[in-house]
Amino acid sequence: MSKRPTTRKSPARRPQTRKRPTQKGRVRKKQPGFLERSIASLPISEATLRRIMTWAIVLFVGAVALAIGAWFGVPQKAGVAVAEGVGRAGFRVQQIEITGLKRMDRMSVYAQALDQQSRAMPLVDLDVVRQRLTAYSWIADASVSRRLPDTLAIHITEREPAAVWQNNRQLMLVDPSGELLEPVAREKMPDLPLLIGEGANSEEMARRRLMEAAPALNPMVRAWSWIGNRRWDLLFDSGERLQLPEGEAAAATALAKFARLDATQRLLGKGYVGFDMRDPEKLVIRRQGGAEESRATGLATRSDI
């Protein structure tokens, strides 16, 4: 028998799948988020921003460590050690910025600000620095703050000199409240009102109010003498003395009346010795040799006995 020829089966063809063409150049770029856009809009470089964030983290960790130490009763030395570590990381007083200083010695402010057991920023006691500064007579107030990483900012509010007070032959600058500022030499006296007598420095504000009653006389007054801790005498450049009554209101009334009389009758600069207005009803004019004249009534001229 003849054998049938064997037929080979061809392998089944797999259906060809079409490859999708790759779209080159169409890869979507990730859009920056809100945080990235906000950071990019800041007027500082990225390196500076990273440095600020690093120091902020250091401070935060230091503050947390101090808080935990205080909560669990860790000895104070541990907290100081943490603060010193923060100082070694760069938060240490290296600069002092002072504003508002006009008359006081700048080196005195530096000395008080730097008188610290440690210069590490967390250990600088701002309240103590302020108390030391306000102890100076020239300083009315002071504010002290930290400006990280290494600057201590101090703003000084100085007292303003308002007058020169003469007491027991010593001259002192005083402010409007009568606070003593510093001694002044007679040859270096500033162009300020001269107050004479015990307690006259405390009456500076009252003196100012009194002068408002007769501002035209102010340039002619050489000194104000506080008599018996109760009333004023005015000493004029032309040599006369004006005695005012007690009480602020009565003194203001008398001074205003004297200013009007001087404007119409020219009392100052005529060689009179002085004027007495302690009696509200009359003006007594004292002449050379002891004679007196009462201008209130236009009568009585007599001599002292």
Image (tube, helix red, strand yellow):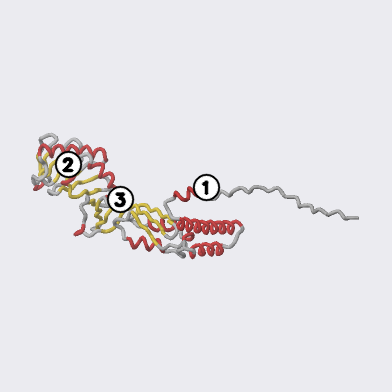
Where 9 sits versus 211, above or below? below
Which residue corresponds to mark 2?
216
Identify the disc placed on residue 103. Answer: none
Left or right of 151? Residue 253 is left
Where in the figure is residue 230, as x and y percent of width and height?
Answer: 27, 45
Identify which amino acid the numbered label 3 is placed on.
Answer: Gly
Tally the numbered discs.
Answer: 3
| Residue 263, picture quadrant | top left
Where 148 sits versus 235, above or below? below
| Residue 300, picture quadrant | top left
Which residue corresponds to mark 3?
178
Given residues 95 and 276, the one toward you in this image is: 95
Left or right of 54? Residue 138 is left
> Which of the two labelled residues, at mark 2 and mark 3, occupies the earlier sequence position?
3
Give the residue at x 54% y 63%: 82
Q: What crowding class fits label 2: few (fewer than 14 Cα within 10 Å), some (14-19), or many (20 or more)?
A: some
| Direction front: furthest residue | 1
The mark lying in front, picked from 2 and 3, is 2
Say what secondary structure mark 1 lies in. loop
Given residues 292 and 60, the one toward you in this image is: 60
Identify which amino acid the numbered label 1 is placed on.
Answer: Gln
Quadrant occupied by the N terminus: bottom right
Give the residue at x 15% y 47%: 236
Given residues 167 and 304, the one toward you in this image is: 167
Left or right of 136? Residue 195 is left
Identify which amino acid the numbered label 2 is placed on.
Answer: Ala
Where 283 sits versus 50, above or below? above
Q: Mark 3 and mark 1: span between their CA atoms?
A: 69 Å
Identify the disc placed on residue 31. Answer: 1
CB under 8 Å between callouts 3 and 1?
no
